[in-house]
Structure formats: structure tokens, C-alpha cells
Image: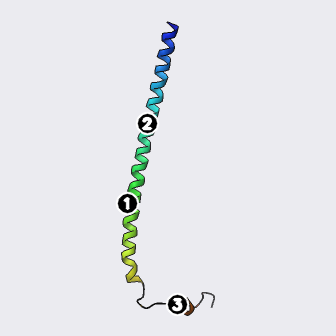
């Protein structure tokens, strides 16, 4: 019966490891889902900023030579 007990012990350890792996996989899936939501939100915000950018820029081209450095 000693051999049977070791098989039961090994089975119990494997079940414990499987449960832990499933919990970790679930947490990883939740993290990936949250990150995907953040990426999509940031993409929407970036698109809005790109749409606002042309209105904020002057129509005439500017040269850096025409700019006065901040220390003057």
C-alpha cells in the first residue's frame, strides 16, 4: 500500500499545481484584458489629439531661424 499512497500523494501534488497554474492563467488573462482596454483608450485619445493638432498649428510655415531663443 505504500506505493498506492505515493501515487495518491503525487496525484494530490499535481492537482495542487494544476489549480495554481489555472489561477495564474486567470490572473494573466485579466491583466492582458486590462492592458488591451488601456491601449484602446490611449489610441482613442491619440486620435482625438491628432484631430485637434491641425487647428492648433498656424497655416504659415515657420523657420527655426525666425524663433527667438528663450534666453533673450
Disc 3 vs disc 2: which is toward the camera?
A: 3
Number of marks in picture: 3
Mark 3 or 2 closer to N-term?
A: 2
The residue at the point 43 percent across, 91 percent down is: 60
Disc 3 to disc 1, C-alpha distance? 36 Å
Q: Which residue corresponds to mark 1?
A: 40
Give coordinates of residue 68: x percent, y percent.
58, 91
Q: Which residue is mark 2?
A: 23
From the image, tell me which residue sits under label 3: 63
| Residue 62: percent from left, percent from top | 49, 90
Residue 35 percent across, percent down from the top left = 42, 54
Above or below 62: residue 35: above
Secondary-structure class at tag 1: helix
Viewport quadrant of the C terminus: bottom right
Q: In this rendering, which labeled residue sits more in front, label 3 or label 1? A: 3
The residue sitting at 47% across, 25% down in the picture is: 14
* First along the sequence among labels 3 and 1: 1
- Mark 3–mark 2 distance (CA, rounded to whole Å): 58 Å
Image height check: is 60 above or below 14?
below
- Few, some or many residues within 10 Å of mark 1 (<14, 14–19, 20+): few
Q: Is residue 8 above or below residue 19?
A: above
Amino acid at each position: 500500500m505504500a506505493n498506492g499512497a505515493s501515487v495518491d500523494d503525487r496525484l494530490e501534488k499535481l492537482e495542487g499545481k494544476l489549480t495554481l497554474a489555472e489561477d495564474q492563467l486567470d490572473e494573466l488573462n485579466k491583466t492582458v484584458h486590462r492592458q488591451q482596454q488601456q491601449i484602446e483608450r490611449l489610441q482613442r485619445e491619440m486620435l482625438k489629439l491628432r484631430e485637434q493638432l491641425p487647428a492648433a498649428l498656424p497655416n504659415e510655415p515657420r523657420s527655426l531661424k525666425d524663433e527667438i531663443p528663450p534666453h533673450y
